[in-house]
Amino acid sequence: MEKHNFGKKLKKLRVKEGLLQRELAERTGLHITTIANYEINRREPKANQIKLLAQALGVEMGELFTQEGDGQNGRGAARRYLIAEVFLRMSHRVVHALTINMSNTGIGVYADERINSNEDVIVTLKVLVNRALETAEEVPGTVVWCSLVGKRYAAGISFKKTINDKEFPILAKCIGEKIR
């Protein structure tokens, strides 16, 4: 499978929407040069810019990071579209992040700031409900790993509690599984 190409996917969605780069720039408040640089992978967008791009294109944020065929391996791309934003509350700060993937035992995130391994966090997830973000349950966890990816950080967080229908009904629904 071809490596994911953010710029290529952004351009494809922009063209599908019938927009010029200038029009997408106007909708997002970003400069046209910024849009052009994203499309040729010269620059990587920050988390808040990804949100602006998705809103302007009328897609969920996860769609900017999926390619044809994603989700056909039994995991399902739909859950990536349901989870939208993550806030990691640590002892001394809050980090805004985007979900890469999620299971009933942990979550992978993409953030602008470094997240320290072995740090305890409270994961607050906001999910899309009828195209509006709503806060779902908060889950305690521990950062297992953090790695620099381009200019951003990817991190894996292990939940201290397993996501299940009884304690975390909204998140269990997002994962798309009946978990007891």
Image (spheres, helix red, strand yellow):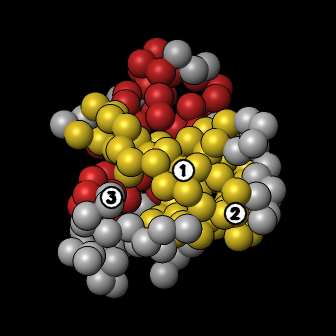
Q: Is residue 175 left or right of residue 10?
A: left
**Secondary-structure class at tag 3:** loop
The type of residue carrying mark 3 is: Phe
Q: Position of residue 180 (x, y in %)?
A: 26, 77
Within 10 angstroms of label 3, few (less than 14), some, or many (20 or more) residues?
some
Mark before the other along the chain sequence, 3 or 2: 2
**Secondary-structure class at tag 2:** strand
Q: Is residue 136 left or right of residue 111?
A: left
Within 10 angstroms of label 1, few (less than 14), some, or many (20 or more) residues?
many
The residues tagged by marks 3 and 2 sit, at their Cα atoms, a distance apart of 20 Å
Any part of residue 34 in sight: yes
The one nearer the camera, 52 or 12, is 52
Q: Is residue 55 left or right of residue 158?
A: left
Q: Position of residue 12 (x, y in %)?
A: 39, 48
The residues tagged by marks 2 and 1 sit, at their Cα atoms, a distance apart of 10 Å
In the image, what residue occupies the spot 56% across and 31% down?
49
- Disc assigned to residue 143: 2
The one nearer the camera, 140 or 7, is 140
- Disc assigned to residue 94: none
In the image, what residue occupies the spot 34% across and 34% down?
133
Contact flag, marks 3 and 1 (Cβ < 8 Å)? no
What residue is disc 1 on?
Answer: 123
Can you tell which quarter of the image residue 119 is in?
A: bottom right
**Secondary-structure class at tag 1:** strand
